[in-house]
Image (tube, rainbow, N blue to C red):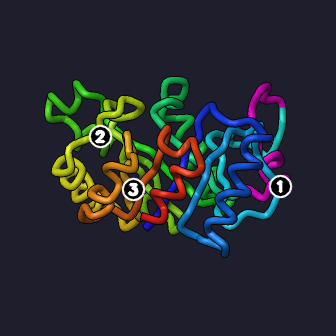
Amino acid sequence: MIYAANLKCNHTRASFELYLKALNEALKTQNENVFVFPPSVAFSQKESFFTQGTQNFYPCINGAFTGEIGKEHLDEFGIKCVLIGHSERRIFENEVLIKAKFDFAKEQGWQIFLCIGEDLKTKQDNQTKDFLKKQLENLDLTYENLVIAYEPIYSIGTGLSAKNEDIEEVLAFLRTLTKAPLLYGGSVNENNIKEITKIKNCGGVLIGSAALKVENFIKMIKG
């Protein structure tokens, strides 16, 4: 079971060092199923027993791309795991850029956490599957280092998780398109994580605000 924490625009370098230390102490040894995506200014070069990933990057080694993060910057911290397509990034990114990021990450052999999800109107119009399929078009769903996180937009940061039966239906649909591990994200917390991880085809969770405090993330990992 994969446990991934997206810290979003939270934590400083100092506070993430404490987060890393506490999580290391809880894990004790290397755990390939635990991932944390801190903000780029909080990246740590210290040894961690989990995989540190980036919430964002630009598909370049370096260059004249003001304000962006390139491979050269990620290499300095040993980061080879990237989050792509989160709905909070899709506001600024079109499908062309998302594909460019995906293809670049694939070329580097990085682990990709690809986020997809529909808004409430799309769900109410019964267009979820068509919408998600379009988000996956032109991307290599056979890539061996791919993880797909289903995150319905109406559940992110709202405290309202999707219904378990809806999650199960969507994950079953996605399983027909890819063999990649499938995660659920969207208001995952200590109260619902056990039920969510029991859902068929659910290979883990992508946790947002409920993982901002390391002690809460540890509790969810430990079950």
Type of the residue with mark 2: Ser
For this view, does 127 lie left or right of residue 73? left
Q: Which residues are magenta?
A: 64-79
Separation of residues labelled 1 and 3 (CA atoms): 27 Å
Q: Earlier in the sequence, mark 2 or mark 1?
A: 1
Q: Earlier in the sequence, mark 2 or mark 3?
A: 2
Residue drawn at (54%, 49%) of the image: 5
Residue drawn at (20%, 44%) of the image: 163
Q: Find numbered disc 3 in the image and state the secondary structure of the residue it sits on.
A: strand
Quadrant of residue 69 in the image?
top right
Separation of residues labelled 2 and 3 (CA atoms): 14 Å
Q: Find numbered disc 1 in the image and state the secondary structure of the residue it sits on.
A: loop
Quadrant of residue 106 in the image?
bottom right
- Is residue 52 positioned above or below 115 on the image? below
Label 1, residues with CA under 10 Å away: few <14, some 14-19, many ≥20? few
Which residue is at the front of the view, 194 or 177?
194
Identify the disc placed on residue 170: none
Identify the disc placed on residue 183: 3
To which residue does mark 2 refer? 161
